Amino acid sequence: MERIRAIENTLKLTTVISSQIGYLLVIAHSGRMLAQAAMCSGFKVLVIDLFADVDTQQYAADFRKTESLAWGDLSSLVEDFLALYPITHVLYGSGFECYPESLVQLQRQLTVCGNTSEVFARVQDKRGFFAAMASFSIPYPEVVFSKPQINDCWLLKPLQGQGGVGIRHFQVDALDDGNCYWQKYQAGVAHSMLFLADGNQVEVVGFNRQWAADLGEAQPFAFAGIINHAELSVNQRALLGRWVVQLSQFFGLRGLNSLDFIVDAEALWVLEINPRIPASMQLYGEDLMRRHIAACAGELQVMPPFAGRYCAYQIVYAPDDVVIPENFCWPAECVDLPEAGVICRKGQPICSIIADYTQPDAVLSQLARVQQSIFNQLHRGFYPHGIPS
């Protein structure tokens, strides 16, 4: 009964908000997830992203494809939409890490459903972020901002990046562009925590295990997938909960965010906060977009723990250059579907898979089966792309 009342309260609030907002502009590297969730929450969705996938178009009242999220590429598309539709609010997703100025420009014209550009920039400021964690005695792998003189298991990481793009093993004699920092490689299993915040309070949505794909020497840590299942102790969950409250209050986080961390036996090592809606959102049910909008408006709905099935999301990367053929038979679990004739270069995403089941191992097996079905149709061999066995 408590869960039903909480859902009803959130629905009432977002019904009012969606009726007031009407059209919601979604801008992201890939907009399908946000467009789908926003449409299911009652919004009329307009999308700008880099792919204009088939299913993204289905969820959008109108869409535009952009070359990048740089303001030089976005500005005319945004102005076009503003001239055609009564837009007052914008919802952003992944990809702005490299283009923070675009968020600043969007915020000057529209109300942002999520963290402000100022909060986003503060969290992305690596020096400030790690200084904040040190002040709260939150453990993280050692970080330096000047080039190490020996290899010694360092990773080179971009100061502005997302999805593991640009992270690679450091070599002393390798060149870098100066827009990077170095972090000690920490063994363990990658995890994340999905949480809601209203600027002060925090509600933990769930804990997830995630994995990467090795796409070659230049891209050995590409984000590949995530499952809403994590074997963490009660003490570990409580400790992570305390840390995320401290960091959320310090930065003033709002809406859905995620905390990335490494688990090594009982030890925990925090890597970063993603101050925008993460991919794990789609593992926890359709009401999360409503709760995100409500939290951004200062209404944090406390709900019982998620009681759904185990669910996982996997990106299918191209093992080599492929062309999507006409009448390609996409398995039912596939999303982010490219149009026929699209060329997916080696290492680029072909599509994504979302699978669910009553047991986590069965979910991972389903991901592997669906991915292999795609490769079989494309006449490619077995290519696991890092799905855990």
Image (spheres, rainbow, N blue to C red):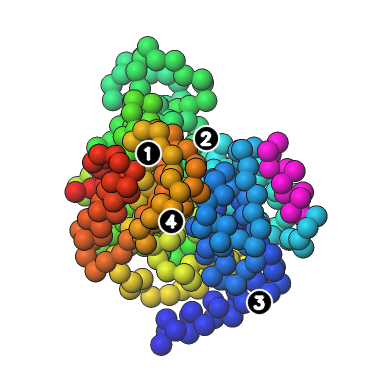
**Residue 329, percent across and down?**
38, 55
Q: Answer yes or no: do the residues labelled 3 and 4 have beta carbons within 8 Å? A: no
Q: Quadrant of residue 216?
A: top left
**Residue to which mark 3 is pinned:** 16
- Give the mark toward the camera: 3 or 4: 4
Q: Secondary structure at mark 3?
A: helix
* Amino acid on which disc 4 is placed: Val
Kindly identify the residue that appears in the image at 48 percent across and 67 percent down: 288
- Amino acid type for the residue under numbered disc 1: Ala
Q: Nearer the viewer, mark 2 or mark 1?
A: 1
Residue with the mark numbered 4: 335
Which residue lies under the disc numbered 1?
318
Residue at the farthest bottom position: 1
Residue type at numbered disc 2: Gln
- In reply to whether residue 266 is colored magenta, the answer given is no
178 relative to 69 in the view: left or right: left
Q: How many marks?
A: 4
Could you say whether the residue bearing mark 2 is in a helix, strand or loop?
A: loop
Q: Which is more N-terminal, label 4 or label 1? A: 1
On residue 7, the disc is none
Q: Which residues are magenta?
A: 71-82
- Relative to residue 152, is residue 64 drawn left or right? right
Residue underneath mark 2: 160
Asked whether disc 2 touches disc 1, contact meaning CB atoms under 8 Å apart, the reply is no
Residue occupying image coordinates x 22% and y 55%: 365
Q: Is residue 4 above or below residue 133?
A: below
Above or below 186: residue 83: below
Identity of the residue drawn at 40% across and 33% down: 321
Q: Nearer the viewer, residue 138 or 263?
A: 263
Gap between marks 3 and 4 measured at Cα: 30 Å
Query: Does residue 256 show up?
Result: yes
From the image, give the main secondary structure of the stretch colored magenta.
helix
